[in-house]
Image (spheres, coloured by chain):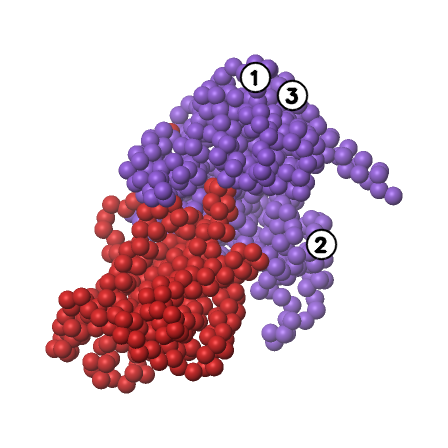
Chain colours: A red, B purple
Amino acid sequence: MTDTALNRPGAPARRFDIGAFVRQYGVLIIIAVMLVGLTLLSPSFLSARNLFNILNQSTPLFIIACALTLVIIGGGFDLSTGAIFGVASVSAAWLAINVDPLVAIIAAPMIGLLLGSINGIIITAFNVHSFLVTLATSLVYRGLAILVTDGKLIPVRVEEFAWLGRSKIEMVNVAVLVMFGFMLLMMVILNRTTLGRAIFAVGGNEEAALLSGIRTNLVKIITFALSGGAAGLAGVITVSRLSMGEPQAGAGYEFDAIAAVILGGTSIMGGAGAIWRSMAGVLLMALIGNGFNILNVNPFFKDLTTGVIIVLAVALAATGNRR
Amino acid sequence: MTSATTAVRVRGVAKSFGGTRILDNIDVEIAAGTVHALVGENGAGKSSLGKIIGGYYTPDEGQVEILGRAVARFSPRDALQLGVAMIHQELQLAPELSVVQNVFLGRESARAGILVKGDMARFEALEKTCDFGISPLARVATLRIAERQKVEIMRAIARDAQVIIMDEPTSSLTEDEADRLHEVVKRLKSQGKTIIYVSHFLDHILANCDNVTIMRDGRVVRTSPIAGETKKSLVDSMLGQEAEILYPALPAAPAGDVRPVAELRNVSTDAGLSDISLSVRPGEIVGLIGLVGSGRTEVARAMFGADRITGGEYLIEGRRSEQRLSVRRAIASGVALVPEDRRKQGLVLTQPTRFNVSLGTLGAISRFGILGTSAEVRRTREMIKHFGIVPAAVDGRVARYSGGNQQKVLLSKWAVAKPRLLILDEPSRGVDVGARRRIHDFIVDMARQGVGVLLISSEIEEVINLSHRCYLLSDGRIFAEEPASSLTVESALHRVFLEQNSHRNRQEGAAP
């Protein structure tokens, strides 16, 4: 070995690189700025009640974005989460009324898991881009939800069923606890298991993953199944909270979830990213919404602001790739 | 040649990336109408210098003059306007467009933005000076790398480039394709063009360049006429010390009656192999010699379960597998493949060293699917030390490593697996002299430990010097088997070419 290698661009810089820090943790910096700003602007913002309220309201999106992170790191894209949410919503309502509330709570994520697996199987069997497949299946799933209900709402007045969405343990909503549990599970899968490694490898370099003996198709199917399962779980939480099964529920959630993942800084190219980033992305979007509520600003500005921040975040991340 | 004007003058150029100085006080003059080589180890700065001249990087200090005009703004577009075109190692063509569309990309015959006829006529005029014989309507995706390179060259000439920078032009070419490229270089030179030739292949440089600038650690060691240089004098200057291009001594070959670790019997595949029979014994290094496209890589892929075997038998440790061989099964039975393209097939560049070292053997460092981080870190550290990977960081960013260090990470991935059959496809392509030496030592070391090694390389010299036994391939068939000691580079090349030609003739003769 020669010593020429010591002075290469690959060697880590010893100085603290402020630009790299901002690119790496930009989303957290924006969140901190928003927390400070909203606290100064409104005395009612920084109360435990308001903060838990924000978390609780965003629980479905947190759950979907969590699992979607795995799909995107694996090099995929899932546009069907909103539709699966809708299917889970009406199935859970029907099961809670006609079978048993507990069965409904367990079955909804399972139905999501199944629909997600179908996405994954179609994607891998026909080798079609996940964007196209999930766009198509989202129409099918949504259509099914509308078809079986005739497009009508299903009110659920079952006491035990509301437990998941409405009850609290001390100050914390059960749904928030479920969300944190699910988030931990996804983090463990991604960072501590061979499956997590395989997801990164498939998204980062599929050919290399194949030549490392990884069952790339199976890995992809699992990520889509988890994403579907998460949408199902989010759906049943929402039905339980609103006491209403709704075939149109969750419309647009697929885009909110994707926006949150991107906002957090997970690469849309796959192969890199983290769950905490998506969590931060959802939180940031929730803070923007909450801030506009508190300040009583025209809600039109909410989407506009979210959009501008996404563009800024993506542009900021891209500056790091330039040479 | 006779012209005394200077095409490119570089004065006091320096460049740093992230606090690391990769070019320091560079002074180079490149005479017009010459072929000028830039050589050095990986990381010596030769590609970076090429990229500054080509306008891809902006220097931190110093000036660059192109044909007497100082470069004010560094961008590939401005460089083109000054007459400089760069042809990259990874070619930059639009694969779905045709040859002629690529050649005139951005320079189409058009009136007020509307495309009009005329590109074909211009292409024919261009073809008269180039004489490449490429069909203008062929889709670039269907062309071989050597032909794509020609498209890039035509594109450069179509833009009236006077200075053409070629970054590692022969690294993906076979010897005969390289020869043809060098013909083109000669022709360009005779037309007064200046070629800056960045390469690792010292033989190619000695045979085709007029002058050479040798770089080391981001500085120019010297610039001299090629006459009077030898491979050894170049390498000595590159390394900064006396060095011999030596190969490590091989362990003794195993006895002929030792059971092979892997054996192919009359194997054929859909990927173009037919009637392949070969064996690799434990502790033996077996080389495959053939031109690119002869089926060398396909043999490796078949033995690794990546291509389906459609006929014949494949025995691992004397056993025939009942089920269809998959990559997973091959790995489980002790086969490892280091693929030819480390960036596309080997490494996950979005992830760090540790991730890449572990990727082939996740099962060995996990329990019920949960990873054991401490075992992983320990294993990775051992490999970093074993191969001398720089930077020596467990979570180093592999994407920014030099070619040699990336290759070492890739070798680590299979070294930790302790394979019984190790297949190496182009293990030392595009790596510096130091890393190359380390890789050779590793190969021999594996054989000494009883691993069967199958070695594939476009450098016939490397195969012959590192193998016990060689198979010669052409058109998906093995046509000869020889002890490596009885082969020379010339004899092997000669036979490979002869076989290829006679095969083609036989095919043509058989056609009605």
Q: Which residue lies furthest to the right in this view?
A: B512
Q: What residue type is labelled 3?
A: Glu
Residues A145 and B332: in front is A145
Callout 2–callout 3 Cβ contact below 8 Å: no
Compare residues B442 and B365 and report the one nearer the observer.
Answer: B365
Q: Distance between the residues labelled 1 and 2?
A: 52 Å
Q: What element carries label 1?
A: loop
How many discs mark residues in the rendered view? Answer: 3
Give the mark toward the camera: 1 or 2: 1
- Residue B83 occupies quadrant: bottom right
Up-down: is B152 above or below B320?
below
Disc 2/disc 3 C-alpha distance (Å):
39 Å
Residue picked out by circle 1: B258
**Residue B385: % across, % down:** 33, 30
Residue depicted at x 18% and y 66%? A169
Q: How far apart are marks 3 and 1 (CA)?
A: 18 Å
Task: Report the amino acid beneath label 1.
Answer: Val
The subunit carrying tag 1 is B
Tell me which numbered mark, 2 or 3, is placed earlier along the sequence.
2
Labelled disc at residue B135:
2
Residue type at numbered disc 2:
Ser
- Which quadrant of the rendered structure holds the N terminus of chain B? top right
Q: Mark 3 lies on which chain?
A: B
Name the spot of residue A294 as percent of width and height, x first.
20, 80
The label number, if any, that marks residue B482 in the structure image: 3
Q: Which of B321 and B510 is in front in this view?
A: B321
Residue A85, image quadrant: bottom left
Residue A218: x and y in percent read: 48, 51
Q: Residue at x 52, y 27 (%)?
A: B453
Whether labels 2 and 3 share one chain:
yes
Residue B34 bears which disc, if any? none
Q: Look at 63% across and 27% down and name the residue there.
A: B278
